Image: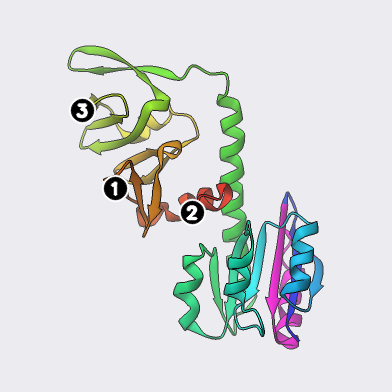
Amino acid sequence: MRAKIVLKFYLLFLSCHVDDEPLALAQLAGYISRIPFLKLIASCQDAHQASKVLASHTIDLLFVDINMPDLNGIEFVRSLPQAPMIIFTTAYSEYAIEGFRLNAVDYLMKPFDLGDCLKAAEKARKMYSMAHNTSQAQTDWDDKERTLFVKSEYKMIRINIDKIIYIESMSEYICIYLEDRNKPVITLNSLQKFSTLLPPYFMRVHRSYIVNLHQITEVSRFRILFGKDTYIPIGENYKEQFMAYIQHTGLL
């Protein structure tokens, strides 16, 4: 019988697991009991039962075995109108690429041990925390002034923060690209220092770029599209944080 475990993270976190083998299911339940921020909520025999649990609980993380009868794990996740964070488990590596296309947090290859499970769970918890910290910080910015002055070519230029599309680092200078200016505003500054002046809907996605998350048109193959033809790469060290935002907001 295929089975699913619904879990709850302490401190705001719900999660869920699917596995078709009773022994593997029991083993995972044992791992869960040893991870202090996880709590088992329910076990389900198939995707239909799991759907009922998801409909009645706010689930944040779903562990899903890919090889299930009738409806496999990937098809099940695709069928969810609003999928939570996903960790796939399977003995078949050929599903990995398809799994990550669904923005999976992690991909556990069987047999996996407690360390592997804990590492994946910690990754999910980190992503969850980053997304919620961003939301709280956004609330704190609601009543603040959304303009700032920057020095450029011996002038002080007033910039509407919401109109910033992205910011690019150019050695000792930064280029600020705005939707209401044809040319960027260039000023002597660093991305690190300038980022402290920005609200939480700005995110560093590359060592050379900070982007306005509200201005994103499309995300494809770890590139961000602004407008019709401006692409910004997502750096390897920044993918986890960016994908946490994507999953939390449901952009993808």
Identify the disc placed on residue 243: 2
Question: Does 143 sit above or below residue 88?
Answer: above
From this viewpoint, is residue 39 visible?
A: no
Q: Please report whichever mark, 2 or 3, sits nearer to the chain's N-terminal start.
A: 3
Residue 250 image point, x, y percent? 56, 50
Residue 42 image point, x, y percent? 82, 68
From the viewer's side, name the closer residue of 38 and 99.
Answer: 99
Identify the disc placed on residue 231: 1
Q: Residue at x 70, y 62 (%)?
A: 15
Q: Are marks 3 and 1 in contact (CB under 8 Å)?
A: no
Residue 246 image point, x, y percent? 51, 50
Rounded to the nearest angstrom, the CA distance separating label 3 from label 1 is 17 Å
Q: Which residues are magenta?
A: 13-40
Side of 229 relative to 132 (left or right): left
Q: Residue at x 21, y 32 (%)?
A: 172
Amino acid at circle 1 = Tyr
- Closer to us: mark 1 or mark 2? 1
SS of the residue at dot 1?
strand
Residue 76 image point, x, y percent? 63, 71
Rounded to the nearest angstrom, the CA distance separating label 1 from label 2 is 17 Å
Q: Please report whichever mark, 3 or 1, sits nearer to the chain's N-terminal start.
A: 3
From this viewpoint, is residue 176 visible?
A: yes
Side of 148 relative to 247 (left or right): left
Q: Residue at x 73, y 49 (%)?
A: 11
Q: Residue at x 26, y 45 (%)?
A: 229
Q: Which residue is disc 3 drawn over?
A: 183
Question: Does 35 sit above or below residue 205?
Answer: below
Residue 154 is drawn in which quadrant? top left
